Amino acid sequence: MDYRYLGTSGLKITEITYGNWLTHGSQVENDVATSCVKAALDAGISTFDTADAYANGAAEEVLGSALKTQRRESLEVFTKVYWPVGPKGPNDTGLSRKHIMEGINGSLRRLQMDYVDLYQAHRYDHETPLEETIQAFADVVRSGKALYIGVSEWSAQQLRDGQALARQAGFSIISNQPQYSALYRVIEAEVVPASKELGISQVVWSPMAQGVLSGKYLPGQPAPEGSRATDEKGGKSTISRFMDDGVLTAVQKLKPIADELGLKMSQLAIAWVLQNENVSTALVGASRPEQVAENVKASGVKIPAEAMSAIDAALGESVEKNPALTVSPETRVA
Ligand code: NDP
């Protein structure tokens, strides 16, 4: 497993991170969740991503229990704050000082840890002054409860504004966590160039387009039993953007390209995001330990330029590139 630096910081993370959105505390039972974490550790993954809002705190609890016996110094643990948690009252959401301070304490309690390596603003909060958010993050870092600060789905301008204030407050934003895959490239035009200027790198989510780029969903056919597209607790609706026969037909054209390179389609999808030098890690999910073992083989793969062009030709019009799709809700959700 190869390591990369996170932004311009000195923190090294595995270029494949195991993330537990939709799975832990929800789609899969706790014993399967624990075996996925074990498979990740066995495969050399030391970086894990979660959020307070995943399964309303249960995902952090499951991850914390699964990692409890590990040497803390050998792990990099990321969590996030913004989306509503607990009883979802008016102050249980957003990036106010109150919610950030309560949020970090709640996350550490559920994870059974003294600190997280990266604390991320899960979205941009249009209702809280940015100065208040950044000052609260500065205080979280000074308290030692988080070592570094990142954000998720911020636009280029929001990254610029946030970084300027962070530097005045004595720290730097080192990462941004956007959706990025061969099918969803909206960060390439604006967010990536701004990030490079600012010393920020990308921690990218859904590199497999939630499983679609593994090729297991076939056009005109029902989704495989037990897959995310059949998960009524949330997966089915979140994956629906890609469950279109035109997209699924284009994805099947990637199979010969993967075969030619001796890769599974899932590995090709993960390796594809890692070809972007501004990407520090691919955040990969898994509902079974066998998937983790398969996916980690994408680390270190170099995709030749001709194959990258063949991927573009195969996916054609199915690729989403509109930079305006990097948006955070105008009003906090409660
Ligand atoms: P992926 O695109 O990696 O999709 C993972 C899902 O695909 C798995 O749960 C599994 O679903 C399926 N899958 C995984 N491996 C294989 C395989 N080898 N063959 C076939 N199917 C496979 O990423 P996610 O959408 O899960 O997101 C990854 C992480 O990103 C999250 O856990 C979270 O940490 C982060 N994230 C962050 C967000 C943000 O707003 N910041 C938003 C969303 C995610 P199944 O078996 O059920 O079909």
Image (cartoon, rainbow, N blue to C red):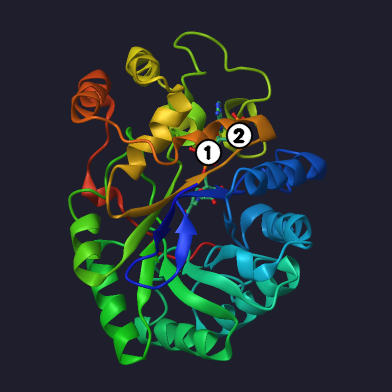
Q: Amino acid at mark 1?
A: Val
Q: Which residue is mark 1?
A: 296
Q: Residue at x 73, y 44 (%)?
A: 33
In the displayed structure, does residue 299 sit left or right of residue 113? left
Depth order, front residue of 312/42: 42
Mark 2 CB within 8 Å of ligand 1: no
Q: Quadrant of residue 308?
A: top left
Depth order, front residue of 136/126: 136
Q: Do callouts 2 and 1 mark residues in contact (Cβ within 8 Å)?
A: yes
Q: Position of residue 247 (x, y in %)?
A: 35, 21
Depth order, front residue of 62/327: 62
Determine whether 245 is above or below 131 in the image. above
Q: Is residue 298 visible?
A: yes
Could you say whether the residue bearing mark 1 is in a helix, strand or loop?
A: helix
Q: Residue at x 19, y 24 (%)?
A: 306
Structural distance between the alpha carbons of marks 2 and 1: 6 Å
**Quadrant where the image shows the C terminus:** bottom right
Q: Amino acid at mark 2?
A: Ala
Q: Residues within 10 Å of mark 2 (few under 14, many from 20)?
A: some
Q: Residue at x 59, y 72 (%)?
A: 116
Q: Is residue 288 visible?
A: no
Q: Position of residue 264 (x, y in %)?
A: 46, 22
Mark 1 CB within 8 Å of ligand 1: no
Q: Quadrant of residue 286?
A: top right
